[in-house]
């Protein structure tokens, strides 16, 4: 190994000194100050100048977050849903993503109430479950799991009003009421004639029993039946049953 010791290397002409050829490696034992490097030995991170060997604190991005949607089950017609969460910025983009097909549908309208609440109006023509994608104007976003269900509510097939007229003491084998998509039926108000009961089923329910002979005057019984589907959607319908008694304790005068 050869060693060359000099105090100064100067160009013979011009202002450039070339050491070796392209690809050669030079090993030195001296430290080069940042100020001696082109650009003063700095790099730029997110708009901040950082010296080589230095450090910088990079601000974290603030993403929106999701906690709930109300209601969480809707029909195909336009429905307003309140979305709760955090870090919302006026006004976010809200998109529903079909969990099965991946098809996306943008909200018809989004209104901003606060950093923790927005309202989105959806018209989703295809039944199914949907994820939500919520994106703030700065591009920060969140995607939820499947949190929104689109399903047809129960639809009554039995007309409201009278289910018939029956004599006190008569036996009713079956009065059937039906509603599509319903999985259960309950009486929410009113009174059935004494002796009759509601028997729930899937898609239909029956009213059966023997009308009490203790009913001594003609009476119109009014009540409301609620049909409920698997998603908890409901539809109410009002009905009546008339109970007749005929002439009782009559007398004759000559």
Image (cartoon, rainbow, N blue to C red):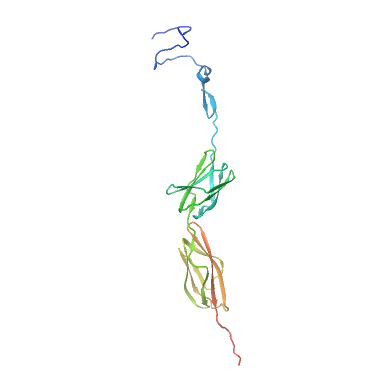
Q: Is residue 26 above or below residue 242?
A: above
Residue name at image x 55 percent, y 27 percent: 48
Looking at the rendered structure, the number of numbered marks drawn on it comes to 0
Residue located farthest toward the bottom when viewing the structure as drawn: 254
Measuring from the top left, give residue 37's x and y in whole percent.
50, 18
> Which residue appears farthest toward the right when viewing the image?
253
Residue located at (56% from left, 74% from top): 220
Residue at point 49%, 51% (across, down): 148
Quarter holding residue 203: bottom left
User: Residue 189 location, x and y as percent?
Assistant: 56, 66
132 is higher (above) or lower (below) than 195: above
Horizontal and vertical percent position of residue 167: 52, 78
**The one of 200 and 25 positioned closer to us in this rendering:** 25
* Image location of residue 5, percent across then percent down: 45, 7
Quadrant occupied by the C terminus = bottom right
Which corner quadrant holds the N terminus? top left
- In the image, 10 versus 62, the foreground residue is 10
Q: Is residue 57 above or below residue 238?
A: above
């Amino acid at each position: 190994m050869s060693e060359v010791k000099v105090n100064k290397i100067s160009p013979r002409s011009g202002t450039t000194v070339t050491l070796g050829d392209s690809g050669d490696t030079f090993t030195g034992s001296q430290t080069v100050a940042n100020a001696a490097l082109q650009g003063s030995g700095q790099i730029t991170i997110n708009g901040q100048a950082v010296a080589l060997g230095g450090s910088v604190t990079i601000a974290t991005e603030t993403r929106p977050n999701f906690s709930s949607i109300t209601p969480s089950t809707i029909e195909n017609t336009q429905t307003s849903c309140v979305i709760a969460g955090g870090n919302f910025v006026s006004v976010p983009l809200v998109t529903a993503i079909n969990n099965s097909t991946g098809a996306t549908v943008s909200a018809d309208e989004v209104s901003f109430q606060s950093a923790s609440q927005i309202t989105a109006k959806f018209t989703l023509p295809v039944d199914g479950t949907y994820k939500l994608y919520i994106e703030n104007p700065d591009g920060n976003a969140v995607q939820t799991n499947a949190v929104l269900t689109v399903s047809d509510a129960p639809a009554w097939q039995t007309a409201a009003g009278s289910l018939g007229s029956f004599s006190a003491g008569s036996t009713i084998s079956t009065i059937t009421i039906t509603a599509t998509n319903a999985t259960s039926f309950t009486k929410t108000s009113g009174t059935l004639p004494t002796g009759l009961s509601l028997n729930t089923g899937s898609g239909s329910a029956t009213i059966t029993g023997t009308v009490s002979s203790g009913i001594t005057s003609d009476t119109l019984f009014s009540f409301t039946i609620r049909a409920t589907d698997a998603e908890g959607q409901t539809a109410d319908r009002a009905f009546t049953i008339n109970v007749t008694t005929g002439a009782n304790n009559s007398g004759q005068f000559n």
